[in-house]
Image (spheres, rainbow, N blue to C red):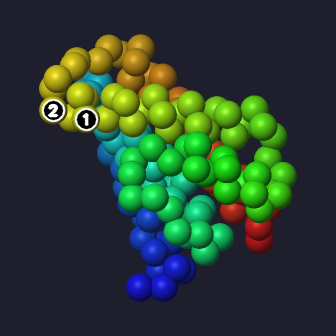
Amino acid sequence: MTNEERKDYLFSIAKKKFKEMLNSYKEENWNMVIRNAQESVECYLKGILKLMNIEFPKEHDIGDYFGKIFKQKKITVDNNILDRIKLVSEELTKKRAPAYYGEEFYTREEAEEAKNYAEFIRNFVKDLLEKLK
């Protein structure tokens, strides 16, 4: 599979998980909102790295790695945005497994935050892709 094919695959998964997150939100399934938000964020960020022909670690939390790559490559992104990307990735990854396996039950407020995080990452990626065109 080429980098282009992997990028397209990751973005397709990110979009699918984003839709599943929205459906879970409508159904008030707060744990699955968190799980799907995390998976969407992870695939969006990894898709951007693949677009840049960069291999990524095979782990769920890549926010810190993502920011380091952008700084290494001298890609101009506000440090506050990179810090937020790191926070989003870290926070959602911590909640991912407990949400999925019912080890913890999350509230509407926590699901709303996860949804907002996923929307932030999706919008960041969409804006970045527009700039690259």
Name the residue type under label 1: Ala
Mark-to-mark CA distance, 1 and 2: 6 Å
Figure check: 15 above or below 89: below
Q: Which amino acid type is marked by label 2? A: Tyr
Residue 96 appears in view: yes
Q: Residues within 10 Å of mark 1 (few under 14, many from 20)?
A: some
Q: Residues within 10 Å of mark 2 (few under 14, many from 20)?
A: few
Q: Where in the figure is residue 6, as x and y percent of width and height?
A: 46, 75
Q: Residue at x 15, y 32 (%)?
A: 101
- Provide the residue designation for mark 2: 101
Q: Position of residue 24 (x, y in %)?
A: 29, 35
User: Disc 1 designates what residue?
Assistant: 97
Element type at marker 1? helix
Q: Residue at x 64, y 32 (%)?
A: 84
Q: Is residue 44 above or below residue 50?
A: above
Above or below, comparing residue 70 to residue 50 in the picture: above
Q: Is residue 58 left or right of residue 66?
A: left
Q: Secondary structure at mark 2?
A: loop
Whether residue 90 is situated above or below residue 14 in the rendered picture: above
| Camera-nearest residue between 107 and 90 | 90
Q: As rendered, which of 123 and 3 lies closer to the eye?
A: 3
For this orientation, the residue located farthest to the left is 102
Quick one: quadrant of the C terminus? bottom right
Point 82% across, 58% down: residue: 74
Q: Position of residue 58 (x, y in %)?
A: 39, 58
The picture places residue 89, in percent across and down from the top left corner, at 50, 38
Q: Nearer the viewer, residue 117 or 45?
A: 45
Compared across the picture, whether 14 is left or right of 36 comes to right
The reply to whether residue 22 is visible in this rendering is no
Q: Residue at x 48, y 34 (%)?
A: 90
Q: Are marks 1 and 2 in contact (CB under 8 Å)?
A: yes
Name the image quarter holding the N terminus.
bottom left
